[in-house]
Amino acid sequence: MQYTIQKDKKDQLGFLIVRARNMIVKHLHRNFINNGHDLTHEQFSILISLVYQDGQSQQELANNTFRDKVSATKIIDSLEKRNLVVRKTDSMDRRVNKIYLTDAAKKVFPEIYEIAQGTMNSAVDGIPQNQIAEFKSVLNSIYENLMKYEKV
């Protein structure tokens, strides 16, 4: 299939994806702030990645959150300053730091997760589940198509 970039940016696929993403990020941050959590979506993505698999290396976290290592390190630094994560030297390789959630993060995470869940529920309100599933499938296909061109 051929895709033609439309004259009107409101019909351009890339524009629509970025616009929707930015609106989700804006609302997520606002909802965190309104509920007493000065947290960015970048910080949330690191925290949720650690909830699913605690003790990841900084490189693993960067890869799992689609960031470069420098950006991930800065986000981890900010979370560490807030006592939400802690770095521990890997017992097998002293050059590697593993990142772990603190007890404070584990305590506050359920509330943060509910705020994020509520934000996403608002974003998809009124959209039938089959359309959401199809949309996710299309986005995954776009990702897979472009991954073919990435260097391994």
Image: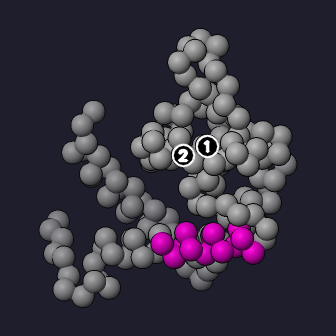
Q: Residue at x 74, y 59 (%)?
A: 112
Q: Residue 79: percent from the left, percent from the top?
A: 67, 47
Q: Residue at x 61, y 43 (%)?
A: 77
Name the amino acid type tagged 1: Asp
Q: Is residue 100 above or below residue 112?
A: above
Q: Residue at x 75, y 64 (%)?
A: 37
Number of marks drawn: 2
Q: Residue 147: percent from the left, percent from the top?
A: 29, 46
For label 1, the SS is helix
Whether residue 2 is in magenta: the answer is: no
Neighbor class of circle 1 (other Cα within 10 Å; few <14, some 14-19, many 20+) is some
- Magenta segment range? 22-34
Which residue is the site of mark 2? 74
The colour scheme used here is one colour
**Does residue 41 appear left or right of residue 79 in this picture?**
left
Query: Mark 1 near mark 2, Cβ–Cβ under 8 Å?
Result: yes
Q: Residue furthest top?
A: 92
Which is the main secondary structure of the residues drawn in magenta?
helix
Which residue is the site of mark 1? 77
Q: Which quadrant: the N terminus? A: bottom left
**Does residue 115 appear left or right of residue 73 in this picture?**
right
**Does residue 62 appear left or right of residue 53 in this picture?**
left
